[in-house]
Image (tube, rainbow, N blue to C red):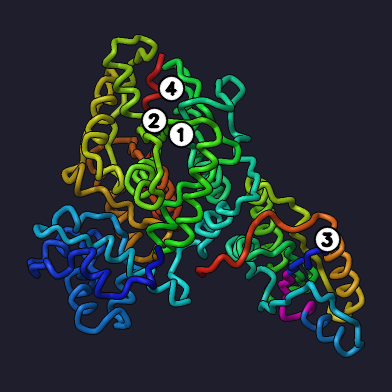
């Protein structure tokens, strides 16, 4: 299904734009508008209805939107603004124009390359020898982009594969020896949100077949975007999609509730602050679970920012689209509000939040320092 | 039938481009597999452009820059080499052989050297075979 087949009237109808009441809650909720940019979802929507998507305001709007979904959540009439933006991006690139991507579109290039059937990656070089995995089985641990992030963003000095190592360590502790694929293909979340529907459909098909070939029934992931993609988008694109997606927090929670003592926790005398992620905010139960899990670590002092859970979901850019001045402002705001809580450690559930916030901290002239870590890694630190 | 290889050559505007025009003056043939892109400096060719070339189905990519002591911009070749090293690591993860990406230095009069390097590179890529990546799948 390509977006160019969809005329503007279909896009407007599918995203429910006609239900807009002009109340302006979308702009009030928008993290970009908050930084001072002239950015109004309802204005863009009415311009599309009035003049179509050739309007300069609309063109700037669709590549500046972060698709974080805060406006969707706040809209009283249920308008799906982020879907609207995604479909307009699709129309844009289907017409042969290039989108406005960060990092020169390199991350999206990687995803398109992974949709080639003949590709044979070797992405498991990071796997420590003590981790037990299988080549076939019912449970898969989906590593995601982490090995690529560590190489591409080498200059940031982050080690995001540590998230995968810690997740696998926890799974092994839970007596699960998951399948890990050397030729795992990306979930395609960013391709989908950057508007490349054809590319996503190709990638999803290859990815699904690769996973199915290993006898997998359940996918466990530590990434909010992979979870969202497998739960919400794959079933729409692949009618026969029959895999269950579970976040590792849910699995740990189940294990702790069943009274299993393989996950004994030692005290961590630290003060931490959470940074919620946009894609996990679609699953409030999962974000509640990680709060509960970390709450069980003795001596760990959790101090939330005033706008936690819904207000702080944005790390400034998403889907490798349009990183700029306003993204930086959002990132600085996130760092400032965390530092104001007095915490030394910022904990997020999404590797991209870590990348974006670390990038801002590495900027010339930014002197505040804060340690940042993934929720899984913090939990693994507390394991006895 | 042997598939025709797709080789992309990024030529810096200064010495390599002068070698390239020199090839025309001297009537030295250019291998048919090579597509040339003129850039203002070899250092401009960053990881994203290199990945895009492979994404679009290039079987081999050659970057031709000026000699280190001869760069118009000062650090072009050094930057290019740094970008190439960065790209090698990504190609390794993707399972693409690093021989598919190469950097060469030129002085402005070295048309024969450019010609023989291009022929040699095309031959080497021919031995490696087609890239496993299906290029030109549509969207930009």
Disc 1 chain ID: A
Residue A43 visible to an observer of this rendering: yes
* The quarter of the displayed image where residue B50 is located: bottom right
In the rendered image, residue A319, in percent from the top left (x then y), is placed at 40, 56
Which quarter of the rendering shows the N terminus of chain A? Answer: bottom left
Instruction: List the residue tagged with mark 2.
Output: A376
- Among numbered discs 4 and 1, the one appearing first in the sequence: 1
**Residue B10 falls within the magenta-colored stretch:** yes
Q: Are marks 3 and 1 in contact (CB under 8 Å)?
A: no
Instruction: List the residue tagged with mark 3.
Output: B126
Q: Nearer the viewer, residue A73 or A50?
A: A50
Instruction: List the residue tagged with mark 1.
Output: A163
- A156 lies left or right of A345: right
Q: Are marks 4 and 3 in contact (CB under 8 Å)?
A: no
Residues behind callouts 2 and 3 on a single chain: no
Point 23% across, 64% down: residue: A14
**Residue A210 falls within the magenta-colored stretch:** no
Disc 2 chain ID: A
Q: Does dot 4 land on a helix, a strand or a loop? A: helix
Q: Residue furthest bottom?
A: B25
Q: CA distance from mark 1 to mark 2?
A: 6 Å
Q: Nearer the viewer, residue A234 or A278?
A: A234
Disc 4 chain ID: A
């Amino acid at each position: 299904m390509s977006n160019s087949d969809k005329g503007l009237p279909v896009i407007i109808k599918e995203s429910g734009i006609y239900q807009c009441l002009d109340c302006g809650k979308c702009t009030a909720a928008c993290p970009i508008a908050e930084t001072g940019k002239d950015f109004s979802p309802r204005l863009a929507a009415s311009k599309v209805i009035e003049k179509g998507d050739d309007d300069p305001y609309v063109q700037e709007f669709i590549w500046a939107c972060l698709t974080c979904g805060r406006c969707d959540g706040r809209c009283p009439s249920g308008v799906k603004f982020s879907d609207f933006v995604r479909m307009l991006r699709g129309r844009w690139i289907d017409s042969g124009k290039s989108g406005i991507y960060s990092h020169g579109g390199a991350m999206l290039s990687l995803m398109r390359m992974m949709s080639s059937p003949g590709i044979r990656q070797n992405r498991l070089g990071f796997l420590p020898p003590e981790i037990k995995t299988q080549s076939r089985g019912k449970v898969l641990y989906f590593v995601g982009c982490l090995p690529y992030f560590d190489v591409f963003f080498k200059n940031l000095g982050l080690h995001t594969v540590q998230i995968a190592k810690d997740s696998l360590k926890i799974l092994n502790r839970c007596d699960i020896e998951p399948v890990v694929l050397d030729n795992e293909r990306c979930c395609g979340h960013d391709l989908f949100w950057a508007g490349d529907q054809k590319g996503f459909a190709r990638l999803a098909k290859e990815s699904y077949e690769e996973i199915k070939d290993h006898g997998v029934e359940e996918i466990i992931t530590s990434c909010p975007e992979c979870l969202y993609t497998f739960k919400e988008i794959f079933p729409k694109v692949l009618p026969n999609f029959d895999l269950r997606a579970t976040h590792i927090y849910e699995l740990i929670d189940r294990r702790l509730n069943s009274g299993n003592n393989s996950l004994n926790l030692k005290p961590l005398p630290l003060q931490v602050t959470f940074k919620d992620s946009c894609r996990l905010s679609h699953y409030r139960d999962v974000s509640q679970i990680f709060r509960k899990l970390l709450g069980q670590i003795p001596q760990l002092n959790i101090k939330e920012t005033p706008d936690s859970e819904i207000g702080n979901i944005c790390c400034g850019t998403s889907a490798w689209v349009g990183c700029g001045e306003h993204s930086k402002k959002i990132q600085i705001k996130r760092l400032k509000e965390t530092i104001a809580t007095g915490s030394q450690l910022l904990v997020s559930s999404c590797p991209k939040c870590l990348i974006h916030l670390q990038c801002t901290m590495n900027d010339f002239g930014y002197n505040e320092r804060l340690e940042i870590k993934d929720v899984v890694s913090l939990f693994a630190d507390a394991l006895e | 039938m042997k598939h025709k290889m797709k080789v992309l050559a990024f030529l810096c505007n200064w010495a390599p481009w002068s070698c390239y025009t020199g090839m025309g003056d001297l009537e030295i043939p250019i291998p048919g597999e090579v597509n040339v892109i003129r850039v203002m400096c070899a250092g401009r060719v960053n990881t994203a452009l290199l990945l895009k070339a492979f994404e679009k189905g290039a079987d081999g990519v050659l970057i031709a820059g000026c000699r280190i002591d001869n760069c118009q911009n000062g650090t072009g070749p050094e930057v290019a080499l740094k970008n190439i090293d960065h790209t090698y690591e990504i190609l390794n993860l993707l399972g693409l052989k690093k021989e598919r990406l190469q950097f060469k230095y030129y002085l402005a009069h070295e048309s024969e050297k450019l010609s023989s390097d291009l022929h040699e590179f095309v031959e080497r890529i021919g031995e490696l075979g087609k890239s496993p990546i299906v290029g030109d799948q549509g969207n930009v």
